[in-house]
Image (cartoon, coloured by chain):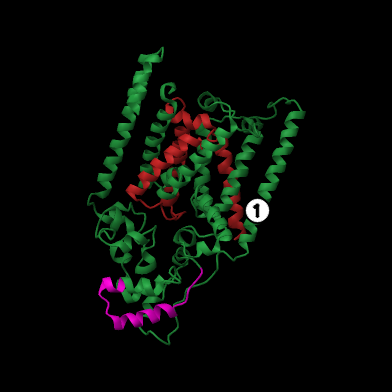
Chain colours: A green, B red
Amino acid sequence: MIELGLINSTHLTNSSGMKDKRLFQILVIMLLAAGLAAAGVWLTSDSTPVDAQCTTPSSCKTCHEVQGQKPVNNGSDWHQQHAIFDFCEACHGGDRNAVQKSAAHAGLRTAFVQMAPTCRNCHTTELETCLSTYAGELGVDDSSLGDILEMAVSAPVGSSTILDQIQSGTLVGPQESSESTAGSEPASITSTGTFDSPLNLVLAVVLGCSLVGGTVFVAWNERRLRRSSREAIGLLQNVAAFVKKENWSPYAAGILMGLAGILAVLIGDHLLTASGPVATIASSIFNAVFPGAAEGNMYFRFVVPPEFSWAVMLFVGIFFGGMLGALTSRTLRLRWSDDPTWRKVFGRSPWKRVLIGFVGALLLQYGASIAGGCTSGLAISGGMLLAPSAFLFMAGMFIAGIITVVVIYRRRY
Amino acid sequence: MIWSYAIALLLGIVFGFALNKGGLTRYGNIIGVFRFTNLTVIKFMLTAILVGSGGLYLLKTWNVVDFPNIPATYIVGNIIGGLVFGIGMALSGY
């Protein structure tokens, strides 16, 4: 596709300059790809596991997946189907935040009988089938399978998610309850009922108010802009003038963003993110509209559980923050496709903007879900913690972005 | 609980404000970085990372903060996700 662009460059007046630019660009892509390959080789090479965690605890996956020590995903269907995020701890116990191997492996559960009860957290209806399937593979005989089944069925089912349980440290039990099967107090799994909590009402009200309020405000603002001619801007105070400036230096805005990122970790104990809450809101809607389908869905129940999370509130803030920024620079307007760069390539049709924007946003959100974050959540926030994943993601993002733009713009590039 | 949400809202506003003023909400700026004609996005991102990592690692050295779980590294996942994300980003101009 890049070659195609090169052939077409004869149309241009300044073809030698363009050729240089293309060459530069291909070089950059190759450099990024080489960097990626080097990072891959370095990460998969057998370095000492403790050092590779950069003294920051990450997860079981640092050793068992990234560094390939006893890789569980090779040759076992079960782990391939279930190994999402940091779920190892849910069945195997241990301490995924520990840096030392001995501490991380403390209290590790490896026997099937100890882990079976956790299966019920997700497989509510088809527990028996699931357990029998894997019992056969693991060589558990039929008589003890009966005991395991009985115990697993009698274990309580919490409606809280596994992630919640891990975070609150309440996911214990299978270890103890396996000692004495019947009669003992079952595992203490809290049931907070994330989706039934009143916070979801708050979420609905906040989102509803945002929608209605935003629409009313946009309508009011449009009328205001049409009616009044612009008054003189600035000359009040330096600060006011700076705030009102439409285009800040990216360095100034970057510093503000960096400070926000520090504050988020310092007082919020979270990372700034923008794509995570979108998935959470989508999951909330899916769970509310199709509760039946969501019931058996791993992704919508456990990976992205419906809840009014910290990040959703952050997302509401981002919306109004962006609006505030535009308001102070007096550029807040309802627009469709008035960006000059866009018009040059795609024309003036607003529907084209909406359609391509929608398709692009779908891809973007899908990619973010695969990678574990977006430009904000992974590249910037992860980059602040110097996480390798952030830089891998950025390299992938720029490679695909450059190639896509070359394809879209072709000789206009 | 309510304070935690108030902080989230406030930080979100600062975050959105910074994105808007930095020009990250404009299509031309996003596309420009892939065309090497406008490097606003790179300048913004790397400044934020510089300030953020400098500040956070200093605070960590002084034992003021504990890091939350850092984003997990899945080489293939991160890269493929990044590639798909890049296509979407170039199309939508997000």
Residue A235, image quadrant = top right
Q: Give the image location of residue A296, x and y in percent.
A: 47, 65
Q: Is residue A302 left or right of residue A239?
A: left
Residue found 66% across the figure and 31% down from its top: A330
Q: Give the total of numbered labels.
A: 1
Q: Nearer the viewer, residue A254 or A79?
A: A79
Work out whether residue B68 or residue A160 is closer to the camera in this orientation and state it.
A160
Q: Is residue A288 visible?
A: yes
For the point 35% across and 46% down, which residue is it?
A388
- Residue A271 magenta-highlighted: no
Q: What secondary structure predominates along the stretch shown in magenta?
A: helix
The chain that hosts pointer 1 is: A
Query: At label 1, which amino acid type do we have?
Result: Val
Chain part drawn in magenta: A134-159
Q: Residue furthest top?
A: A13
| Dot 1 crowding, Cα within 10 Å, few <14, some 14–19, many 20+ | some
Residue B21 shows up from this direction? no
Q: Which residue is mark 1?
A: A206
Dividing the image into 4 quarters, which one contains the N terminus of chain A?
A: top left
Image x and y of residue B6, in percent: 61, 53
Quarter the C terminus of chain A occupies:
top left
Q: Residue furthest right?
A: A227
A142 within the magenta span? yes
Residue A123 at x, y percent in the picture: 43, 69
Residue positioned 33% across, 74% down in the render: A132
Q: Is residue B28 left or right of residue A104?
A: right
Q: Please determine whether, in this image, residue B17 is positioned above or below residue A69.
A: above
